[in-house]
């Protein structure tokens, strides 16, 4: 930052755009606090949900904090980081990473696949592709009368199909 002319006496001022609900605002406030350490003064720009996603699609923001539910790398990597993907909002494109994404997708050996995923994540971090601010935790609970629910081990968002669930009362 100092080589760009910013420092203790000259902070960069930006707006951090986030949906105007706690689940989005809270991490945005944490980000704004952390940015102060590198001479960036962030101002929270809370946006109503009906306007937030169109604003993101227009790329009408300086810093847009969006939450990304991550599940299987086969879903997340190509959508969020793949060259040309509609959900790759910062237009990150690295053909070498695309090749690794494809490699991990077809790898049958789980240990080798895990190593490829770590390699992809390391490269994404080095490239500052879409910095991850935090990982949230979520849980699922249910009443004993709920039958047929399969809890997922890698995400609370994967098991949203409810055709096999019933109440036994």
Image (cartoon, rainbow, N blue to C red):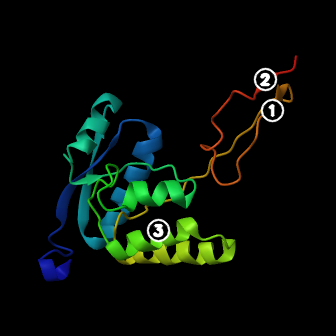
Query: Residue 148: which disc?
Result: 1
**Callout 1 secondary element:** loop
Label 2 crowding class (10 Å Cα cut-off): few <14, some 14-19, many 20+? few
Q: Is residue 111 left or right of residue 97?
A: right
Label 1 crowding class (10 Å Cα cut-off): few <14, some 14-19, many 20+? few
Q: Earlier in the sequence, mark 1 or mark 2?
A: 1
Q: CA distance from mark 2 to mark 3?
A: 38 Å
Q: Residue at point 65% right, 70% down?
A: 108
Q: Earlier in the sequence, mark 1 or mark 3?
A: 3
| Viewer-side residue, 136 vs 155 | 155
Comparing marks 1 and 3, which lies closer to the viewer?
3
C-beta proximity under 8 Å, tags 2 and 3: no
Residue 47 visible in rendering: yes
Q: Is residue 108 left or right of residue 142?
A: left
| Viewer-side residue, 153 vs 139 | 153
Q: CA distance from mark 1 to mark 2?
A: 6 Å
Query: Residue 101: which disc?
Result: 3
Query: Residue 166: which disc?
Result: 2
Across and down, in percent, residue 44 comes to: 29, 47
Q: Quadrant of residue 90?
A: bottom left
Residue farthest to the left, as pictured: 5
Q: Residue at point 26% right, 55% down?
A: 63
**Callout 2 secondary element:** strand
Q: Residue at point 29% right, 57% down?
A: 84
């Amino acid at each position: 930052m100092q080589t760009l002319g910013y420092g203790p006496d000259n902070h960069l001022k930006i707006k951090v755009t986030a949906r105007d609900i706690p689940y989005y605002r809270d991490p945005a406030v944490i980000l704004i606090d952390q940015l102060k350490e590198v001479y960036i003064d962030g101002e929270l720009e809370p946006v109503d949900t009906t306007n937030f996603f169109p604003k993101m699609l227009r790329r009408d923001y300086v810093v847009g904090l969006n939450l990304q539910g991550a599940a299987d790398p086969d879903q997340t990597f190509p959508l969020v980081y793949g060259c040309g993907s509609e959900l790759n909002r910062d237009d990150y494109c690295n053909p070498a990473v695309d090749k690794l994404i494809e490699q991990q997708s077809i790898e049958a050996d789980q240990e080798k696949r895990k190593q490829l995923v770590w390699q992809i994540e390391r490269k994404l971090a080095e490239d500052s592709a879409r910095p991850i601010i935090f990982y949230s935790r979520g849980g699922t609970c249910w009443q004993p009368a709920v039958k047929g629910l399969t809890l997922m081990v890698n995400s609370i968002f994967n098991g949203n199909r409810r055709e096999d669930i019933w109440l036994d009362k």
